[in-house]
Image (cartoon, rainbow, N blue to C red):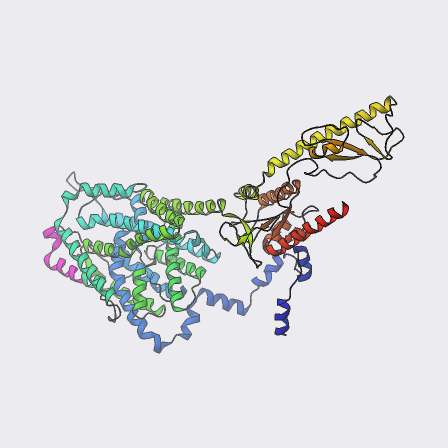
């Protein structure tokens, strides 16, 4: 049977149009969506409920199959390593968000623990992330600046910021933002809108995160130099902050600067050693934790705050706090920012998740990841967490130290829980300069993305433009407006690329039925009498007129000019017809029969018909070149003689370009290759009808080849087909259309020679 099918597949076939193919292949009629067809999918059953439960709680699927002997030790070691990283990064990123350090610990515990139940990536380390933290920090600075909490010190004219009130207000604001971010992510996940992240292309995300890293760097310079600066928000806030820091450099606290420099050098060197000897080390040296412990001990023992004026973290309350409802009055003010944070956080998380999934051979559910991230944020917001995403540095450590599943995340969250309950309060003397040093060194990977520029210059200039515009817009307009402007620009590049596609005339490769661009392939030769036109883009309202213009230009014929000349010639033809009829009527009225006529014929304006001859008129036209055949003719532009025939009773034939004395195109058929067309709209259907009409006017047949089934169905629904345009003009391949048009032209030539 298989051999028979293989032989029948190789048998040559005749040319098939789409109309014939539908009969032969028995095409099913297009299905009409209805509520009834959707009902079976929505029916409740035990299997459906079980499937939904396993989908929304993925740990129920993989945990019973967890290979304890193979994975548990690796997950414990990995979880401990990542937990050690969570501690300094949580404290540092809370500082970056403008919040008390303890909120960073909360954000490193609750979301990480919740991700175990809902997440599908086995290697993603969720928790505080620099880009998300700086987005939150810019929002807290703009809505709740420190100037709003100035108080006069008793008995003096000195004003100071009430940090306790400010921190409480900011925690309430950020908790509201986090809850709203979670709502957006869960809603998008339930609606299967995980694809929304596709509007953030990779160059856009990398350009945006690089610019966000510059924001992070500038925001931490004040902690490195130990100066106090104002809080700016909105466009150009980055430059305002940087200028003020430069102005206050003479006020630099030397102790703070030295502390930051020593910490940065130590962390950088050890991280490089970790990277260089990664294969030999059982786990990376936790230099960030070591630096925090040593610096806290030195700060406590030497009393750096009193002696050198070095700013420290301050009180870190121990224990967990009960959940608190968000302040719903903030929703209207932060809805746009929350959506931006939701999309950016998810984009970073899913991109990392897919990288690890591809490397280790498992699948990440993009919609479930969106739901998981949303639930982590939504529930975490009630416990004073700020919005989280995935950290590349922690995820790489989790993978490299033997992490195999989400169990590593649970171990990491337990490390943070112990810190919150018992150890956290010991870090109250930790210098803020140390946290700033940790943040800045961790930006190294982000700044490496500048290496994208030469690569994109060689590979894709449009993507390079997206990267640069995103970077510059984010620097100038701040993180929220910059993201919106970057997405808008990215979409515009897609629109422009569809409006400026590559148009080509195809030719046949010798001894094959393969057709390629004649400008690109030397052996591709145009089929005589046939123009095969192809566009690299789909057709829709924004580019279909450009498509029609490019087709006419590539054909080598001024179609519109030729149609205009034909209309003028026909108009002159009608005038001559009317003049001939008037002459006939005038001579009939005066009874002038003129000279004897040949049987059944009379010459216009020289030999009118006899009064008794009432047969129908047929107008026959000769061009200027045929003028010598006639004896008496009315000479005009391209029209020489009118002959009125009364012997023939058939309907008059339509004048041709040749009979009108007009130039004829060098080709008889145009084939539109629709292989790249993915959809059509109502505007493109109208323009396609005009293309068929215009080329028909100049006696050129139009055929369509390789039209996808969905596009054909859209043409049917758009009433594209009629008595003039049928499916017989559509062919499943370019070669079918070429063979058919060539055979039709050959047949027409034989018919003309037979009549002659």
Q: Is residue 643 left or right of residue 697?
A: right
Q: Quadrant of residue 488?
A: top left
Q: Which quadrant of the figure contains the C terminus?
A: top right
Whether residue 426 is visible to the viewer of this picture, yes or no, is no
Residue 56 place in picture, x, y as percent: 45, 64
Residue 18 percent across, percent down from the top left: 65, 55
Residues 333 and 37: in front is 37
Which stretch appears magenta? 293-316
Q: Residue 601: where, in percent of width, then height?
A: 84, 34
- Name the side, left or right, on which 718 lies relative to 74: right
Q: Is residue 652 positioned above or below 273 on the image?
A: above
Quarter that holds the N terminus: bottom right
Who's the residue at 15% across and 56% down the image? 262
Specify the quadrant of the image occupied by residue 569. top right
State which quadrant residue 373 falls in: bottom left
Does the rendering let one see residue 218? yes
């Amino acid at each position: 049977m298989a051999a028979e099918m293989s032989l029948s597949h190789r048998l040559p076939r005749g040319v098939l149009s789409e109309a014939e193919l539908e009969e032969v292949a028995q095409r099913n009629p297009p299905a009409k969506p209805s509520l009834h067809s959707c009902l079976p999918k929505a029916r409740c059953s035990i299997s459906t409920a079980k499937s939904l439960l396993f989908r929304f709680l993925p740990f129920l699927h993989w945990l019973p199959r967890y290979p304890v002997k193979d994975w548990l030790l690796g997950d414990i070691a990995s979880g401990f390593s990542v937990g050690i990283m969570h501690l300094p990064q949580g404290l540092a990123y809370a500082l970056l968000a403008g919040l008390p350090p303890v909120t960073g610990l909360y954000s490193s515990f609750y979301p990480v623990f919740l991700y175990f139940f809902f997440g599908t990536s086995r290697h993603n380390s969720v928790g505080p992330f620099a880009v998300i933290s700086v987005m939150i920090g810019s929002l807290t600075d703009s809505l709740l600046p420190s100037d709003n909490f100035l108080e006069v010190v008793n008995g003096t004219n000195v004003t100071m910021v009430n940090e306790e009130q400010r921190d409480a207000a900011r925690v309430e604001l950020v908790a509201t933002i986090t809850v709203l971010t979670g709502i957006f992510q869960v809603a998008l996940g339930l609606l299967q809108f995980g694809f929304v992240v596709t509007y953030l292309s990779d160059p856009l995300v990398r350009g945006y995160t690089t610019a966000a890293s510059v924001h992070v760097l500038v925001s931490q310079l004040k902690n490195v130099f130990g100066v106090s600066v104002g809080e700016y928000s909105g466009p150009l806030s980055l430059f305002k902050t940087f200028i003020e820091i430069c102005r206050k450099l003479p006020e630099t606290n030397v102790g703070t600067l030295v502390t930051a420099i020593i910490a940065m050098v130590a962390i950088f060197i050890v991280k490089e050693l970790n990277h260089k000897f990664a294969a030999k080390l059982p786990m990376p040296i936790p230099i960030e934790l070591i630096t925090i412990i040593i610096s806290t001990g030195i700060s406590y023992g030497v009393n750096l705050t009193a002696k050198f004026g070095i700013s420290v973290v301050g009180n870190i309350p121990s224990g967990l706090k009960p959940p608190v409802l968000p302040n719903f009055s903030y929703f209207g003010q932060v809805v746009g920012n929350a959506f931006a944070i939701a999309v950016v956080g998810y984009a970073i998380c899913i991109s990392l998740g897919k990288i690890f999934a591809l490397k280790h051979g498992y699948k990440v559910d993009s919609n479930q990841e969106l739901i998981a991230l949303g639930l982590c944020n939504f529930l975490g917001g009630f416990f004073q967490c700020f919005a989280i995403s995935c950290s590349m540095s922690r995820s790489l450590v989790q993978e490299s130290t033997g992490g195999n599943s989400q169990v590593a995340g649970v171990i990491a969250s337990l490390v943070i829980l112990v810190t919150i309950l018992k150890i956290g309060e010991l870090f109250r003397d930790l210098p803020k300069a140390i946290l700033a040093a940790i943040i800045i060194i961790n930006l190294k990977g982000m700044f490496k993305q500048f290496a994208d520029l030469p690569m994109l210059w060689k590979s894709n200039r449009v993507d390079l433009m997206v990267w640069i515009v995103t970077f510059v817009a984010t620097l100038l307009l701040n993180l929220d407006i910059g993201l919106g402007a970057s997405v808008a620009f990215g979409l515009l590049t897609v629109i422009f690329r569809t409006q400026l596609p590559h148009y080509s005339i195809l030719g046949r490769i010798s001894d094959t039925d393969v057709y390629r661009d004649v400008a690109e392939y030397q052996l591709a030769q145009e089929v005589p009498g046939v123009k095969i036109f192809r566009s690299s883009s789909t057709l829709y309202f924004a580019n279909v007129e450009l498509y029609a213009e490019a087709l006419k230009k590539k054909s080598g014929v001024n179609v519109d000019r030729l149609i205009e000349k034909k209309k003028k010639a026909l108009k002159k033809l009608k005038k001559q017809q009317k003049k001939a009829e008037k002459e006939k009527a005038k001579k009939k009225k005066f009874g002038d029969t003129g000279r004897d006529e040949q049987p059944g014929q009379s010459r216009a304006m020289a030999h009118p018909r006899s009064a008794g001859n009432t047969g129908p008129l047929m107008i026959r036209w000769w061009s200027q070149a045929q003028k010598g055949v006639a004896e008496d003719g009315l000479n005009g532009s391209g029209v020489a003689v009118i002959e009125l025939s009364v012997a023939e009773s058939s309907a008059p034939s339509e004048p041709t370009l040749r009979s009108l004395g007009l130039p004829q195109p060098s080709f008889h058929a145009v084939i539109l290759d629709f292989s790249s067309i993915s959809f059509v709209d109502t505007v493109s259907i109208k323009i396609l009808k005009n293309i068929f009409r215009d080329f028909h006017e100049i006696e050129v047949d139009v055929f369509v080849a390789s039209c996808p089934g969905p596009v054909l169905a859209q043409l049917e629904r758009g009433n594209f087909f009629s008595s003039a345009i049928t499916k017989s003009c559509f062919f499943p391949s370019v070669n079918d259309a070429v063979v058919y048009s060539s055979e039709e032209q050959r047949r027409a030539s034989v018919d003309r020679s037979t009549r002659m």
